[in-house]
Image (spheres, grey):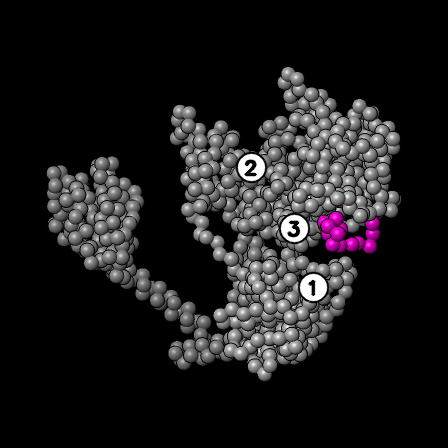
């Protein structure tokens, strides 16, 4: 039996022999395409060619593209695990022609590979063509020996491909495989016919050949393209199922060892039927998570990050069906990397990083998962009669309080035979949502009116080495307080890559303006200045630019320090560390990085010392401009999520750091002077943040700390080495004093018990104590009430105290009364009189309020209530 690795390689080799260039798979996180959540097809990275905006130095290409289909238009998530061929992550084998060969070669080569190389039974192969594509049908009849009765025509839905509502499009021909009558799920349905594009699982698509030959305009009119392209996509897991003779994608070798690993970890054997859904879902989802995180994705609460979080939590919930109550999914990633790491080395490189994030997410969700399941089960068990619907408030509570994605609740509802009240959920969601505000520094050019002075289409930045220049003004606009100027040349750095914009001044017609911000607007730099009267730029106006040199230098050293910091963190923790974001200003820097645990104080000091050692080495900082592929082949570090062009700028600092970066930097590491970490914290699961300062700001921090130490030395009258010992001794003494004080307060409170008991009143057979007492904290108040309860029969005790200017209340009820007069109701009613609230158990409850002025009145009211 051919292995999946052999099948993939045979596909690639087949087309390489036919003069195709093998191209690397694009990341599953499509940073350069905001229209996509995830890379969902092999053609995504060639979209610019089809749109006519890009070119390559080859006209034929082949690859195996890693794809994710979950969320958005292409969403297979709900079907994952239920059948044998839907996945959230899959590989797509593809070959392309960019204005080179066309239908004849595409069809004949596809048939050759399937039937001559892979020896697939020709009688089981079917071809579908577009209803009007006579050419494709004729080619199937003439360049292949397919059974002509296995060719059929279909409409727009099945056999016409388009990128969007407008743009490149064309007919497609699909190749389907007949798995046999046993795969038909509708054998007993009268009149049912198994056929390609039918409604049963017997005949399924394995390869789609798209012929991009038209351009569709806004009116739907199709115009032939000057160059015709071929875009094909074959489901790798499906073709492996066919060649390996399996009845499910989950039973091919790609999944077999993953499922075995799940069996080993959980102790639950896999079942090929319905009971095996948890194994199949987890096996699929761990692939999705490992590939997405390795390509820079991160579980979060919005966008693609939330899709990843949903997938992870879906897997965790299925893990509970395998009796797993602790994080375990992250452990399976080892097996995925072992199986697929040869073709996709990035999943091995970032394995530890991905495992840390997955484990942290699992742990976080498990803390609320079981409580959420209890809430759901309680709701379901409490439903009687025919109303089998999960109400909107419950769906929302599961989402908002317990972190249940709505599709996870829907899945649980389906298993329990319940429907979902989605309108009710949407109502709850809309109530909670605040109106989102647009946080845009500058509006895009299409949204505002500019006064245009020149036809120049881009601003040239030459501010890496120059801080002053003279330029022309391309266009400008004004508002009440500001003038926005677009120059043809700029020495001002525009905010990007985490680095803030330069400050300085510009001068027009002898009038100097303060520059307060610079932003990019497409290919333009927009300089924002404070407005002055009399400014009216003209076509002939000259713009004198002067960057604040001190401000720029301080930004330079802080930016260079972020590179050294990343190198130092990697030296301490390993190469899996990846930058997740940064902020660089003149007086502080933030560095966000992927790691799954808090950095210890010892490691903070180690990282800080390594950075300072790099600074003392006074390494040269050099920049090189080169093709992106060359930089990647050298192992240069790139930032996840950053879009890079074909030509990139590489910043090197000796041999300790080499990163793609467009920011401004120092000339040597020694220019940084001194580096000091201010804090290290968590900002999200698996993401840590370091804040630090450099140069004079770091020296100022050290000086402040020195002043503090000297003040302590004088205050305690000790030598500096003795400070820690003296402070520890003082802390222990304070702790002992606090303990003694608490004991005295406790005794003082308990001394009031006898007096309180003598002041009790009796209503019927109920003894009532309601009084304001003198106590120092709410814990003592509660203990006092509980002690009174233990010494009395048929009693209700309500005590109040002014603690720190706020009203504290406690109610205790003896066991014989708590069923009819619960403590929680009494204390809640009294607290509401004071504008507060509270509650608790039937025998003991507490409350609080800000208004102490009516405390006596509120305490007395309990007698009338009872």
Residue 13 location (% of width, % of height): 84, 43
Classify mark 3: residues with Cα within 10 Å, few (<14), some (14-19) or many (20+).
many
Task: Give me the C-alpha separation between circle 1 and circle 3.
Answer: 18 Å
Task: Give me the C-alpha separation between circle 3 and circle 2.
Answer: 25 Å
Tag 1 near tag 3, CB within 8 Å: no
The magenta segment: 46-65
Tag 2 near tag 1, CB within 8 Å: no
Q: Is residue 239 visible?
A: no
* Residue tagged 3: 29
Q: Residue at x 45, y 38 (%)?
A: 423
The mark that comes first in sequence, 2 or 1, is 2
Image side of residue 720 versus residue 527, left or right: left
Q: Residue at x 12, y 41 (%)?
A: 763
Tag 3 near tag 2, CB within 8 Å: no
Q: Is residue 388 above or below residue 313?
A: above
Residue 207 location (% of width, % of height): 75, 36
Is residue 736 covered in magenta?
A: no
Q: Secondary structure at mark 3?
A: loop
Residue 346 location (% of width, % of height): 70, 51
* Residue tagged 2: 318
**Count of numbered circles in the view:** 3
Q: Quadrant of the N terminus?
A: top right
Q: Is residue 268 above or below residue 567?
A: above
Classify mark 2: residues with Cα within 10 Å, few (<14), some (14-19) or many (20+).
some
Residue 745 location (% of width, % of height): 25, 59
* Residue tagged 1: 660
The mark that comes first in sequence, 3 or 2, is 3
Q: Is residue 840 visible?
A: yes
Q: Residue at x 46, y 41 (%)?
A: 426
Is residue 48 covered in magenta?
A: yes
Image side of residue 220 versus residue 145, left or right: left
């Amino acid at each position: 039996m051919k292995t999946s690795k052999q099948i993939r390689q045979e596909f690639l080799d087949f087309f390489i022999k036919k003069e195709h260039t093998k191209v690397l798979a694009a990341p599953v996180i499509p940073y350069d395409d905001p229209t996509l959540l995830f890379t969902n097809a092999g053609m995504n990275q060639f979209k610019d060619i089809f749109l006519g905006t890009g070119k390559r130095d080859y006209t034929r290409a082949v690859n195996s593209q890693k794809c994710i289909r979950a969320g958005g238009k292409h969403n297979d998530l709900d079907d994952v695990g239920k059948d044998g061929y839907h996945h959230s992550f899959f590989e797509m084998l593809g070959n392309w022609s960019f204005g080179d060969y066309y239908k004849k070669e595409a069809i004949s080569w596809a048939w050759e590979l399937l039937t001559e190389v892979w020896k697939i039974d020709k009688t089981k192969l079917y071809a579908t063509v577009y209803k009007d594509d006579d050419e494709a049908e004729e080619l199937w009849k003439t360049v292949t020996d397919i059974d002509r009765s296995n060719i059929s025509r279909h409409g727009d839905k099945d056999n016409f491909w388009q990128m969007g509502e407008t743009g490149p499009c064309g007919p497609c021909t699909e190749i389907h495989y007949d798995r046999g009558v046993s795969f038909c799920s509708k054998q007993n349905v009268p009149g049912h016919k198994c056929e390609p594009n039918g409604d049963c699982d017997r005949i399924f698509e394995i390869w789609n050949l798209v012929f991009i030959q038209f351009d569709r305009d806004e009116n739907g009119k199709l115009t032939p393209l000057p160059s015709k392209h071929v875009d094909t996509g074959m489901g790798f897991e499906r073709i492996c199922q066919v060649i390996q003779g399996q009845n499910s994608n989950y039973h091919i070798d790609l999944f077999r060892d993953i499922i075995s690993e799940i069996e080993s970890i959980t102790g639950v054997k896999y079942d090929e039927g319905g009971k095996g859904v948890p194994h199949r879902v987890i096996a699929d989802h761990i692939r999705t998570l490992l590939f997405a995180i390795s390509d820079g994705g991160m579980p979060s609460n919005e966008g693609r990050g939330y899709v990843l979080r949903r997938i992870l939590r879906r897997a965790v919930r299925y893990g509970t069906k395998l009796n797993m109550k602790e994080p375990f999914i992250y452990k399976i990633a080892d097996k995925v990397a072992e199986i697929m790491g040869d073709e996709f080395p990035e999943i091995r490189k970032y394995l530890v990083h991905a495992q840390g994030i997955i484990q942290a997410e699992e742990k976080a969700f498990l803390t609320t998962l079981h409580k959420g399941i209890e809430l759901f089960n309680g709701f379901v068990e409490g439903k009687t009669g025919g109303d089998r619907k999960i109400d909107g408030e419950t769906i929302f509570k599961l989402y908002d309080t317990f972190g249940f994605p709505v599709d996870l609740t829907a899945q649980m509802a389906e298993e329990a035979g319940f429907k979902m009240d989605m309108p009710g959920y949407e109502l709850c969601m809309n109530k909670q949502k605040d109106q989102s505000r647009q946080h845009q520094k500058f509006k895009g050019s299409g949204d505002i009116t500019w006064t245009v002075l020149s036809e120049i289409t881009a601003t040239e930045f030459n501010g890496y080495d120059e801080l002053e220049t003279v330029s022309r003004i391309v266009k400008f606009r004004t508002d009440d307080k500001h003038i926005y100027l677009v120059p043809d040349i700029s020495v001002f750095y525009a905010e990007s890559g985490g680095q803030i914009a330069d400050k300085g001044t510009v001068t027009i017609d002898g009038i100097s303006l303060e520059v307060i911000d610079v932003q990019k607007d497409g290919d333009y730099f927009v300089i924002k200045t404070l407005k002055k009267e009399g400014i009216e730029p003209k076509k002939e106006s000259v713009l004198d630019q002067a960057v604040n040199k001190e401000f720029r230098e301080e930004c330079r050293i802080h930016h260079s320090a972020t590179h050294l910091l990343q190198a130092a963190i990697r030296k301490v923790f390993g190469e899996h560390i990846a930058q997740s974001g940064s902020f660089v200003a003149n007086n502080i820097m933030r560095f966000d990085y992927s790691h799954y645990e808090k950095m210890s104080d010892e490691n903070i000091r180690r990282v800080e010392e390594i950075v300072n050692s790099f600074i003392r080495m006074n390494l040269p900082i050099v920049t090189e401009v080169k093709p992106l592929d060359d930089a990647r082949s050298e192992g240069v570090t790139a930032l996840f999520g950053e879009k890079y062009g074909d030509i990139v700028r590489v910043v090197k600092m000796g041999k300790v750091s080499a990163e793609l970066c467009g920011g401004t930097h120092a000339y040597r590491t020694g220019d940084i002077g001194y580096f000091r970490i201010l804090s290290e914290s968590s900002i999200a699961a698996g993401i840590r943040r370091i804040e630090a300062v450099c140069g004079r700001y770091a020296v100022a921090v050290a000086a402040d700390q020195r002043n503090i130490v000297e003040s302590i030395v004088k205050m305690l009258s000790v030598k500096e080495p003795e400070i820690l010992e003296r402070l520890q001794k003082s802390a222990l003494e304070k702790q002992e004093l606090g303990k003694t004080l608490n004991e005295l307060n406790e005794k003082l409170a308990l001394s009031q018990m006898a007096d309180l008991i003598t002041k009790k009143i009796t209503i019927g057979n109920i003894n009532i104590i309601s009084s304001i007492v003198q106590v120092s904290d709410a814990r003592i108040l509660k203990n006092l009430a509980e002690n009174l309860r233990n010494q009395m029969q048929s009693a209700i005790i309500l005590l109040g105290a002014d603690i720190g200017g706020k009203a504290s209340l406690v109610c205790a009820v003896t066991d014989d009364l708590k069923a009819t007069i619960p403590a929680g109701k009494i204390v809640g009613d009294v607290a509401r009189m004071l504008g507060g609230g509270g509650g608790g158990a039937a025998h003991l409850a507490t409350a609080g309020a800000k208004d102490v002025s009516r405390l006596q009145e509120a305490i007395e009211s309990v007698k009338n209530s009872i």
